[in-house]
């Protein structure tokens, strides 16, 4: 599946505002031929992997206030769910998430975190494939068969770029100044209202 077609699938799912993104995406994929569902999944993993970088992870850490492999998987899927324009903006500069409409006078960083943790959308292709075949886990068998029919490729470690200490507020402010201003200020406000003994001032 070419990049343009992949993003057309994502935009079609995003347009279905009557249901969660993951459900809409599964519905859209279930309308495709089985081989196209597998093609989508390959492209999904390529796009998803393209933002497997420390600077994007730092943005996730700032927004969520926590750090985990599973959380970062869901976060990158959430970036895809924002659509091509925002995904490419963030890929170019993770700090641009500070400009997202969910962060502003009517929203908060918490709203953005909730929107970006798209765990179930990771499994949209699986759900669509199994729905079409009517056979549970048929998706995994099809994936294995496809992989077996192709030449094996040597695993290559991804280049995640330069890493740094995410607990260093000064470094976060230097590398992601706008996002850090929003998120670290929020954390400071939360701490000011908490006396350490379970009571707010």
Image (cartoon, rainbow, N blue to C red):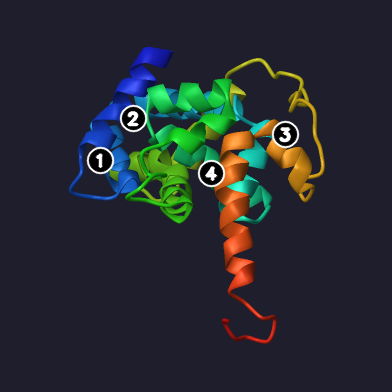
Task: Assign the C terminus to one quadrant of the image.
Answer: bottom right
What is the distance, in whole Å, between disc 2 and disc 4 at their CAs?
16 Å
What is the distance, in whole Å, between disc 3 and disc 1 at their CAs?
42 Å
- Residue 128 place in picture, x, y as percent: 33, 41
What is the distance, in whole Å, between disc 1 and disc 4 at their CAs?
21 Å
- Residue for badge 2: 10
Q: In this view, does 28 lie to the left or right of 79?
A: left
Q: Is mark 1 on a helix, strand or loop?
A: helix
First in sequence: mark 3 vs mark 4:
4
- Residue 144 place in picture, x, y as percent: 56, 33
- Residue 32 place in picture, x, y as percent: 27, 28
Say which of 67 and 9 sits in front.
67
- Residue for badge 4: 75
Q: Is mark 4 on a helix, strand or loop?
A: helix
Q: On screen, 44 above or below 103?
A: above
- Residue for badge 1: 27
Q: Pick out the residue farthest to the left.
A: 18
Say which of 78 and 62 sits in front.
62
């Amino acid at each position: 599946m070419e990049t343009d077609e992949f993003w057309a699938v994502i935009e079609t799912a995003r347009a279905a505002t009557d249901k969660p993104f993951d459900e809409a995406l599964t519905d859209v994929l279930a309308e495709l031929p089985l081989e196209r569902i597998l093609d989508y999944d390959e492209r999904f993993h390529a796009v998803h992997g393209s933002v497997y970088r420390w600077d994007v992870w730092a943005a996730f850490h700032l927004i969520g206030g926590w750090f985990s492999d599973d959380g970062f998987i869901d976060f990158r899927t959430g970036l895809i769910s924002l659509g091509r324009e925002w995904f490419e903006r963030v890929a170019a500069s993770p700090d641009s998430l500070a400009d997202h409409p969910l962060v502003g006078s009517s929203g908060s960083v918490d709203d953005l975190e909730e929107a970006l943790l798209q765990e179930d959308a990771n499994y949209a292709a699986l759900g669509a494939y199994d729905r079409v075949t009517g056979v549970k886990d048929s998706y995994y068998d099809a994936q294995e068969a496809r992989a077996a029919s192709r030449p094996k490729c040597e695993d290559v470690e991804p280049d995640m770029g330069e890493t740094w200490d995410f607990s260093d507020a000064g470094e976060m402010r230097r590398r992601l100044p706008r996002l850090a201003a929003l998120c670290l200020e929020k954390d400071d406000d939360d701490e000011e209202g908490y006396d350490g003994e379970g009571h707010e001032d």
